């Protein structure tokens, strides 16, 4: 786990990648995000949440468990790894969650895939933030409308996913799942959206004084 604290006050944003070991876009993007410089608030990044699954390039891990289905609302997470991840959510008292995945196909295209989809909960202003993010990505990074981002809003707590558990604990903690299409010969690579108060530098150095701490998970 990587945590960056800026001197200026701001929200705490958590980014998770690698819940599913066969979704390289998610953990690759999170691995880059952990090196971003921040101007305000706190950035918490868990780039490879499911390391065993990533090593084996499998969606599931060890005992055949889907890590992103172990976060029931109103109950303890059902595996030790899920509980460790949830402990971070609680300990850091996060304001936003971005859970990064990847998928084949294009959401709403009729091909059965959910790629290029951004899915929010109903918590806080998540739906409006999602729509703003979709518009920003399409305007700034997508040159072929075939690959436009879209998305949907789902009920908080409606599924035992991490984003739903976060969304259900408070109406003030928006959470999102972003699923860029897996890179193929017909789908160009995408740039990652940076929340407005965060910006990256080429060498990962801070533009303002930053406290850096790293914890292995």
Image (cartoon, rainbow, N blue to C red):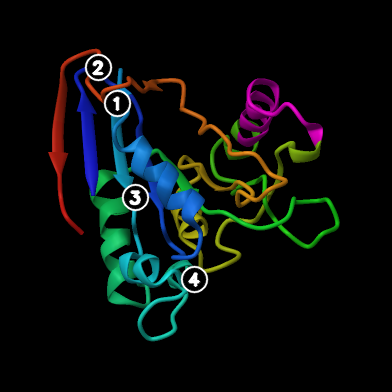
Instruction: State how far apart marks 4 and 1 are (Cα).
Output: 32 Å
Tell me if label 3 and label 1 are in contact, CB under 8 Å. no
Instruction: State how far apart marks 4 and 3 are (Cα).
Output: 15 Å
Per the rendering, the mark at residue 41 is: 1
Query: What residue is shown with label 3?
Result: 47
- Residue displayed at 74% across by 39% down: 147
- Pick the residue in front: 103 or 6: 103
Answer with mark 2 or mark 4, whichever residue precedes in sequence.
Answer: 2
Instruction: State how far apart marks 3 and 1 are (Cα).
Output: 19 Å
* Neighbour tally class for label 3: few under 14, some 14-19, many 20 plus, Cα within 10 Å: many
Instruction: State how far apart marks 2 and 1 are (Cα).
Output: 6 Å
* Neighbour tally class for label 1: few under 14, some 14-19, many 20 plus, Cα within 10 Å: some
Instruction: State how far apart marks 2 and 3 are (Cα).
Output: 24 Å
Q: Position of residue 61 (x, y in %)?
A: 39, 77
Tell me if label 4 and label 1 are in contact, CB under 8 Å. no
Circle 4 SS class? loop
Q: Nearer the viewer, mark 4 or mark 1?
A: 4
Instruction: Write the start and end of the magenta stretch as one range.
Output: 130-145
Query: What residue is shown with label 4?
Result: 59
Residue 117 lies in the magenta-colored region: no
Instruction: State how far apart marks 2 and 4 are (Cα).
Output: 38 Å
* Neighbour tally class for label 2: few under 14, some 14-19, many 20 plus, Cα within 10 Å: few
Tell me if label 2 and label 1 are in contact, CB under 8 Å. yes
């Amino acid at each position: 786990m990587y945590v960056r604290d800026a001197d200026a006050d701001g929200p705490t944003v958590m980014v998770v990648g690698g819940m599913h070991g066969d979704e390289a876009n998610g953990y690759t993007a999170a691995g880059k995000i952990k090196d971003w410089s921040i101007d305000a608030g706190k950035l918490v990044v868990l780039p490879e949440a499911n390391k065993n699954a990533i090593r084996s390039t499998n969606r599931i891990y060890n005992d055949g468990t889907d890590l992103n289905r172990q976060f029931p609302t109103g109950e303890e997470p059902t595996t030790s790894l899920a509980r460790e991840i949830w402990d971070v959510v609680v300990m850091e008292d996060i304001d936003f969650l971005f859970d990064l995945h990847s998928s084949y196909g294009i959401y709403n295209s009729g091909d059965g895939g959910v790629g290029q989809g951004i899915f929010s909960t109903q918590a806080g202003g998540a739906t409006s933030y999602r729509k703003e993010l979709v518009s920003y990505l399409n305007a700034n990074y997508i040159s072929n409308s075939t690959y436009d981002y879209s998305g949907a809003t789902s009920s908080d707590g409606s599924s035992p996913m991490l984003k739903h558990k976060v969304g259900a604990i408070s109406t003030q903690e928006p959470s999102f799942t972003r699923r860029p299409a897996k890179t193929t010969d017909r789908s160009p690579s995408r740039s990652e959206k940076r929340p407005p108060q965060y910006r990256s530098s080429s060498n990962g150095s801070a533009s303002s004084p930053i406290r850096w701490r790293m914890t292995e998970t």
